[in-house]
Image: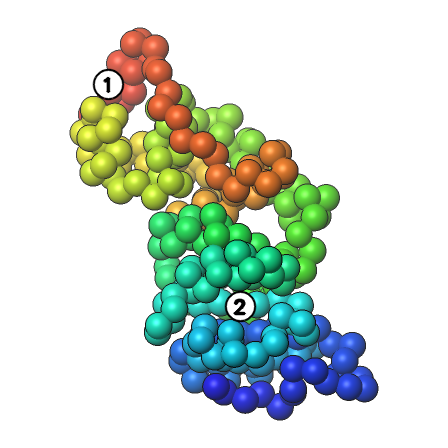
Amino acid sequence: MLKSKISLAPTGELAVKRLVIVVDDDAVVCAGMVEMLEEAGFRAECFNSAEELFETDWAEHAACLLLDENLPGISGVEALARLSAAGTLVPVVMITGAGDVPTAVAAMKAGASDFIEKPASDKDILNAIDRALAPSSDDPTFDGLHVQAAQFTAQLTPRQRQILDLIIAGYPNKNIASDLGISQRTVENHRAEVMRKSGVKSLPALTRMMFVSSLTAQHGTYLPHVQPLKLAPERADLDRERFE
């Protein structure tokens, strides 16, 4: 385990600083994260595996956990599931690979407060921690994403909304095409339109926006339930004419 300069149970002035736990198997990344977090006014400790984390009483002292998905041994999502099953109340921010929608979805289903993609800037990390520490649906960040999601989904055709739900559920283009009885190229074109209308730059970012919207509107429902939509024949024909 990489040791930071601060113990888990500090006294004096350090006791008023919020503790952020980082779990990442890269020692260089750990050192950089600890330094950045301390400069931002947090206390920080880093563990190189979930197994090391579970050997301590970190949850009694921590305000937030930054958990890398790609860990040796117990994966980030598995560790998160264990924490949720144990009733751990510390908010968890999952760190995923770029464009890794299935992991982002799995993390949210397992109880992650938020997730960020690698490579993440210091600003991205600190913003994610801020969101995790203030997860109220009254928070401006949540309200803004809820409005953004509502405006975005209002622009979608029924077919595009259907494909959006399947994308968020982790279905690859090939499976979506087979399930819907359309060509893979049609799915790709619809998917590009969905991304353009969303205004976000990546699929995990889109997943997060829809997750927050669902959480705000339904008070705890993490993902929209995927239900096949029955398109009116004339609307389906319009879609095919445009995208095939």
Residue 77 drawn above or below residue 194 = below
What amino acid does circle 1 point to? Glu
Residue 198 drawn above or below residue 14 = above
Q: Is residue 23 visible?
A: yes
Name the residue: 24% across, 18% down: 241
Residue 66 marker: 2
- From mark 2 to mark 1, how far is it between C-alphas? 46 Å
Name the residue: 70% across, 77% down: 41
Frontmost residue, 227 versus 163: 227
Which element is circle 2 on? strand
Q: Is residue 39 visible?
A: no
Q: Residues within 10 Å of mark 1 (few under 14, many from 20)?
A: few
Residue 72 drawn above or below residue 208 = below
Name the residue: 29% across, 20% down: 239
Quadrant for the C terminus, please: top left
Pointer 1 residue: 241
The reply, left or right, for residue 27 in relation to residue 89 is: left
Report which quarter residue 162 is drawn in. top left
